[in-house]
Image (cartoon, rainbow, N blue to C red):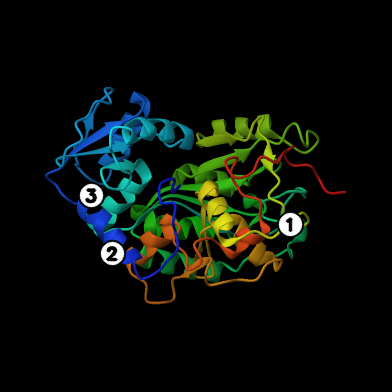
């Protein structure tokens, strides 16, 4: 989830009342819920909602919705700039964020908790191994600094049990490295997830850098369990190692779904660990955190981390683990605790990792670099 709308994310005694106030608005079944944004995004949002609820939306391309107590507006745009452009129009007419105008991801998260009593998470990433076939300088998982290890299958299975004991549904569960296909227990892990939690997972995805052919057993498994392969296209960076075209042909031959990512993209130099930003004030760190609005969560050794780069830095030993930055599922936590964490609330109002990071989005950080430049 990306949270564009809650500028203050400091977890204090007022937060439960704030959440309940928003939840009470969204759970009012007598309100007219208008959906604005492009027709494509509106249709995608309704399709997403129909998996879980028959909540009816009023689709409109006309922004002249009456600002009255019986109406609220949900903006279906996921892009921050598009959202802000639409909100600015409504703001001038007296509409207020999280009172009668909502970001689509915020609205949905509250709806599931306060109306359906369920926690639904957009995306969880699981690190299975720190072994990789590449050694990228600015890897977000800090592979050049990692001790090379495969995490035990017992730990991964235990984590899955703990995660799904408190989260009702994960839309995308992405299995990563390092290089996902080098994990020796991949077949056992995917099979366990599918057999035990297929009704709580929308998609199981495996991340690969396109340099390694999966085994026939894994190909068969992906076909049988409808696993989707996320392929990072690093052809320009490592043409001697990248086998993108041939690997795609293999997936097609086996009728395996795949997505090609990062073609022509740039990476962000997030700074850590060799270019740490100068010291910033609490308000500056909160602003950085809000602009970053990072969407991927990591689940590692029973803890949900808000930032995947933070989690990777902890795994590598480069950065200390801090309870401000994660939610420990071993503790007695409730659905509203998970909702607050998903929204970005922390005791500090930001992550301690923000102190050493330049930001993980282009809104926060404009230090673009070439992808997958290899270490010497």
Residues 192 and 12: in front is 12
What element does badge 1 sit on? loop
The residue identified by callout 3 is: 26
The residue identified by callout 2 is: 17
Label 2 packing within 10 angstroms: few (<14), some (14-19), many (20+): few
The residue identified by callout 1 is: 276
What separation in Å lies between label 3 and label 1 (alpha carbons)? 41 Å
298 relative position to 31: left or right: right
Residue ranking furthest to the top = 62
Q: Earlier in the sequence, mark 3 or mark 2?
A: 2
Percent x, y for residue 188?
52, 60
Above or below, 316 relative to 230: below
Question: Can you tell which quarter of the image residue 20 is in?
Answer: bottom left
Residue at left offset 42%, top offset 66%: 11
What element does badge 2 sit on? helix
- CB contact under 8 Å: marks 3 and 2: no
Q: Earlier in the sequence, mark 3 or mark 1?
A: 3
Label 1 packing within 10 angstroms: few (<14), some (14-19), many (20+): few
Residue at left offset 45%, top offset 47%: 2
What separation in Å lies between label 1 and label 2 (alpha carbons)? 37 Å
Q: Earlier in the sequence, mark 1 or mark 2?
A: 2
Percent x, y for residue 118?
28, 58
Percent x, y for residue 326?
51, 66
Residues 296 and 294: in front is 294
Residue at left offset 63%, top offset 47%: 215
Question: Is residue 13 something that shows in the picture?
Answer: yes
Percent x, y for residue 29?
14, 47
């Amino acid at each position: 989830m990306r949270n564009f709308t809650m500028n203050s994310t400091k977890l204090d005694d007022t937060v439960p009342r704030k959440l309940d106030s928003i939840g009470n608005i969204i759970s009012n079944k007598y309100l007219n819920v208008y959906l604005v944004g492009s027709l494509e995004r509106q249709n995608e949002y309704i399709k997403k909602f129909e998996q879980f609820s028959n909540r009816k939306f009023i689709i409109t391309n006309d922004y002249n919705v009456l600002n009255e107590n019986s109406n609220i507006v949900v903006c279906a745009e996921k892009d921050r700039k598009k959202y802000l452009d639409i909100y600015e129009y409504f703001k001038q007419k007296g509409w207020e964020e999280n009172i009668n105008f909502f970001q689509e991801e915020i609205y949905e998260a509250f709806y599931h908790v306060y109306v359906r009593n369920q926690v639904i998470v957009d995306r969880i990433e699981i690190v299975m191994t720190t072994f990789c076939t590449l050694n990228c300088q600015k890897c977000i998982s800090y592979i050049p600094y990692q001790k090379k290890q495969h995490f035990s299958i017992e730990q991964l299975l235990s984590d899955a049990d703990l995660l799904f004991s408190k989260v009702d549904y994960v839309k995308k569960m992405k299995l990563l490295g390092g290089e996902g296909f080098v994990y020796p227990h991949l077949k056992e892990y995917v099979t366990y997830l599918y057999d035990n939690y297929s009704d709580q997972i929308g998609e199981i995805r495996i991340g690969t850098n396109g340099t390694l052919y999966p085994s026939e057993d894994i190909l068969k498994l992906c076909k049988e369990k409808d696993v989707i392969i996320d392929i990072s296209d690093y052809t320009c960076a490592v043409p001697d190692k990248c086998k993108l075209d041939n690997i795609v042909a293999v997936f097609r031959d086996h009728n395996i779904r795949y997505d090609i990512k990062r073609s022509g993209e740039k990476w962000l130099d997030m700074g850590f660990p060799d270019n740490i930003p100068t010291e910033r004030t609490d308000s500056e760190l909160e602003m950085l955190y809000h602009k970053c609005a990072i969407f991927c969560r990591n689940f590692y050794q029973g803890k949900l981390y808000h930032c995947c780069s933070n989690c990777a830095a902890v795994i590598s030993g480069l950065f200390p683990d801090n309870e401000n930055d994660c939610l420990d599922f071993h503790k007695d936590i409730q659905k509203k605790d998970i909702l607050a964490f998903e929204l970005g609330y922390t005791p500090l109002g930001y992550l301690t990792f923000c102190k050493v990071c330049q930001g993980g989005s282009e809104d926060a950080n404009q230090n673009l670099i070439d992808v997958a430049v290899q270490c010497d």
